Image (tube, helix red, strand yellow):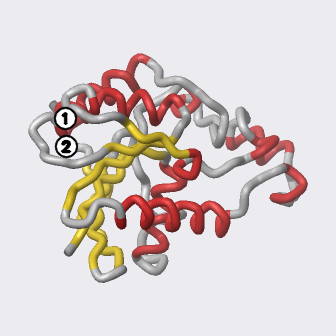
Amino acid sequence: METIMYLIRHGETDWNSSRRIQGHSDIELNELGLHQAELVAGRFKAEEFHGIYSSDLSRARVTAEQIAKHKDFEISTHIALRERCYGRLEGLTYEEIRATFTEQDEAAHGIETFEAMQERAVTALTEIANKHTNEAIVVVSHGGLINSFLHYVTGGLQGTGITKIDNTGICVFRFADRRWEVLQVNNTNHLEA
C-alpha cells in the first residue's frame, strides 16, 4: 500500500522575480506565474490523481485551481502548507536583509524556525498521505516548505541549502510502510512546451 504525492511549487510572483522574501505575505501570481500555472495544469490534465491540496496563500491556491479545473474535485486548502514565516523580513530583498540585519536573531524578527516549519511540513504531508492510501495526490505549496520536506526525506542530502525548486517545479514522493521516498526532484519539463 502506497501513496504517490506530486508536490508542486506555485507559479512566479513579482516578489519572486525581484528576489523579495515572501513568507506568509499573500502575493499574487504575476503574468508569467499564471502562464506557468497553466502549463503545469496541462501536464496533469491526463494524469490520474485523487485529490488536490494547497497552501491557503493565493499564489499556491491559484496554481492549484489551474490544475483542478481539469478534474472534478474541490481543492482542500491548509494553512500548514504555507511557506516559512519570515516576520519583519518579508518584502525585503536578500541585499536589503544583509545590509540592514547584521544579526540574524530569528525570534526578534518574528521568523519561524526552520525546525518548526519542517515539522509542520512533515506532519501535514504525512496526514494527507495517510488519507490517500493506494492513490495519487497533488499538493501545491512553496519552495521553502518543499525543500525542508526534501531535506527531511533525504536526511539532508537534498533540500534546503542544496536543491533549487523552480516555480511550478514538481517533486514526486512515495509514502509506503510509514516511510517517505523521493522519486523525482524539480521536474520542469512542462515549462519547455
The residue to which callout 2 is attached is 189
Q: Where is residue 112 in the image (x, y as percent from the top left)?
A: 73, 56
Task: Please indicate whether residue 58 sits to the left or right of residue 63 in the image.
Answer: right
Residue 175 vs residue 92, the one in the foreground = 175
Q: In which quarter of the image is the N terminus?
A: bottom left
Real-space Cα distance between discs 2 and 1? 5 Å
Name the residue rendered at 85%, 58% in the picture: 107
SS class, disc 2: helix
Q: Mark 2 is on which residue type?
A: Asn
User: Is residue 27 positioned above or below 50 on the image?
Assistant: above
Quadrant location of residue 183? bottom left
Which residue occupies 77% across, 48% down? 98
Q: Is residue 131 above or below residue 109?
A: below
Q: Do the residues labelled 2 and 1 touch (CB within 8 Å)?
A: yes
- Residue topped by disc 1: 192
Q: Is mark 1 on a helix, strand or loop?
A: helix
Using the image as rendered, state which of residue 170 and residue 188 is in the foreground: 170
Rendering quarter of residue 46: top left
